[in-house]
Image (spheres, rainbow, N blue to C red):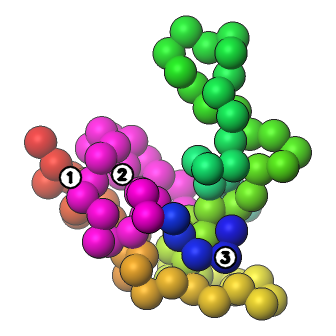
Amino acid sequence: MKQPCKHCPFRKDVKPFLTSEFGQQLAYHATNPYNSFSCHKTTVLDEDSDDGEMMVTKNSKECAGFMTLQINEGMRCPDDFIPSNEVYSDVDEMVFVYSQKK
């Protein structure tokens, strides 16, 4: 993806909607340069799942918010990708915001 979507969990202007634990887990997931995270708009419902899990397919695309957070953490910026200023400035900021969620 080129830009974070309007409901991207990595955007600092979006009210945290994930559980506190999952939001923090996603933030820490961005600290490993070998991890990836697909944009929720490019995943599909796993029909075999009993709890509505989403599944990555060959057409899924990397989340722009996740990539921006990785870049903010000092990881390499892919060619022709412009990081978004709408994303948390670093993992610590995202963890703090999600830790405040009740």
Is residue 17 one of those drawn in magenta?
yes
The amino acid type, in three-letter code, at marker 1 is: Ser
Residue 21 appears in the figure: yes
Q: Locate residue 66, reporting x and y percent.
A: 56, 65
SS type, badge 3: loop
Query: Which residue has dot 3 on it?
Result: 2
| Res 39 → quadrant | bottom right
Residue at (70% x, 61% y) in the render: 62
Of residues 43 and 77, the one drawn nearer to the viewer in this rendering: 43
The answer to whether the residue labelled 2 contacts the one labelled 1, judged by CB atoms less than 8 Å apart, is: yes
Give the residue at mark 1. Answer: 99
The relative height of residue 94 versus residue 74 in the rendered view (above or below) is above
Q: What residue type is labelled 2?
A: Gln
Mark pair 2, 1: CA separation = 7 Å
Q: How crowded is mark 1: few (under 14 residues within 10 Å), some or many (20 or more)?
A: some
The boundaries of the magenta stretch are 6-30
Q: Is residue 78 left or right of residue 13?
A: right
**Which quadrant is home to the N terminus?**
bottom right
At numbered mark 2, what does the secondary structure look like: helix, strand or loop?
helix
- Looking at the rendered structure, the kind of residue marked 3 is Lys
Disc number placed over residue 24 in the picture, else none: 2
What is the residue that sits farthest to the right in this orientation?
58
Q: Where is residue 23 in the image (x, y as percent from the top left)?
A: 37, 49
**Comparing marks 2 and 3, which lies closer to the viewer?**
3
Q: Does the magenta stretch include residue 77?
A: no
